[in-house]
Amino acid sequence: MPPFSFEIVAECPHTRARAGLLHTPHGTIETPVFMPVGTQATVKGLTQQALAEDLGVAILLANTYHLYLRPGHELIRQLGGLHRFMSWPNAILTDSGGFQVFSLSGLRKVDEHGVIFQSHLNGDQHTFTPESTVDVQLAFGSDILMVLDECPEYPVSHEYARQSMHRTVRWARQANQHFRSRVAESPGCHALFPIVQGSMFPDLRRECASALLDLDSDGYAIGGLSVGEPRPLSLEAVEATEGILPRSKPRYAMGVGMPAELAEYVARGVDMMDCVLPSRNARNGYLFTSEGRVIIKHNRYKDDPRPLDERCRCYTCSSYSRAYLRHLFQSGEILYAVLATWHNLRRYLDIMREIRHAIISGSFPEYLKCVRPASEDAG
Ligand SMILES: [Zn+2]
């Protein structure tokens, strides 16, 4: 079996959900999987040991835009690649930087060759091309690389979304050709995923997915979600492409979602997801539990001796009370961010394990039914 491959171990006969194994040079990942976001080659607040050993994270995401600007891909290459640099034993997926260029950088200019942008750190001018972002991610040594894409904001006109989508497809072809020539001597050690765009227009989504099929990639991503659109539209955008993307390849819905939405994406054939929500919300005092959301600053928790989530087996819930967590939050203590992130990530990972178990045991439709009425609360 090549180092990078995907096998499906169970499929739900009533939805499009499937459970699989994604083999990478840095370990096998059970899917569907949630990937914590390590923007700056760190998941804020947690050590790599906690992530890999305690939480069982098999793959995490790092951001090309940030690491390219600081400390720089050449420095990371010199220090042995991203795995060694951050001492991370498991798989790493990097985005292409496109999303951050469009959301963070000030002045930017998109043309056929790529995107010229100003660093949000010091205003320096940089260029990303489909080829250069592959080179940057290969310097990182990422297991899964993403192609450069244009991620339009929401809403945009059908005409703009169409032009932008065609550009994304052309860039994906260029990136794919460059990638294949770069990895010709070590095939199967890295995978490059193209990204389906097309804003919230199902016809453009379908056209984009069909055009990307020619690349015969190891996996496909669905981008342009979570850009301010109403939630039902994100699910429709995923649905539009499900029947087109090959069943035998992993599908990655980028930047989603809330706890109650995870199963909805899986039901639409998604195998991989990432989101900053569990870690960012944790730091802001929003905690996800099996009983719904807890806003830890609320006065009612000030003398609450119970664990945050009585059903959770994480380090935070096994050791500390809501009253203590609230105290740490109110005092602005660093330990609060550590404990809160630990729990929220565990919650997401537990949900994914429940979903996987339900698919394998044939009870996914019932599982979906159970989590649906809870959406409001867990949202
Ligand atoms: Zn917990």
Image (cartoon, rainbow, N blue to C red):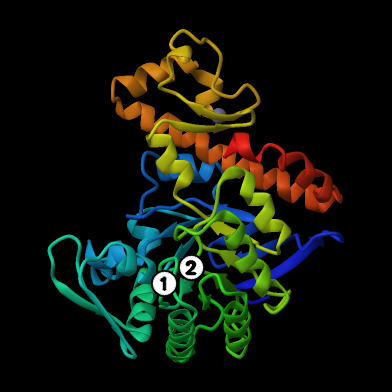
Query: Badge 1: few (under 14), some or many (20 or more) residues near its Cα, within 10 Å?
Result: many
Mark closest to the chain's N terminus, 2 or 1:
1
- Residue 224 bears which disc, if any? 2
Residue 142, percent from left and from top: 44, 68
Vertically, is 58 above or below 312? below
Q: Residue at x 43, y 29 (%)?
A: 339
Amino acid on which the number 2 mark rests in the picture: Gly
Locate the C terminus and report the quarter of the image it occupies: top right
Q: Which mark is residue 152?
A: 1
| Residue at the outermost top position | 303
- Asked which quadrant contains residue 123, the reply is bottom left
Q: Please tell me in which quadrant of the rendered image residue 19 appears.
A: bottom right
Tell me whether the residue at label 2 lies in contact with that at label 1, contact meaning CB atoms closer than 8 angstroms: yes
Total number of numbered discs in the rendering: 2
Depth check, front residue: 175 or 369: 369
In front of the other: 202 or 140: 202
Disc marking residue 302: none
Q: Quadrant of the N terminus?
A: bottom right
Q: Is residue 68 left or right of residue 222?
A: left
| Residue 203 screen position, x and y as percent | 62, 80
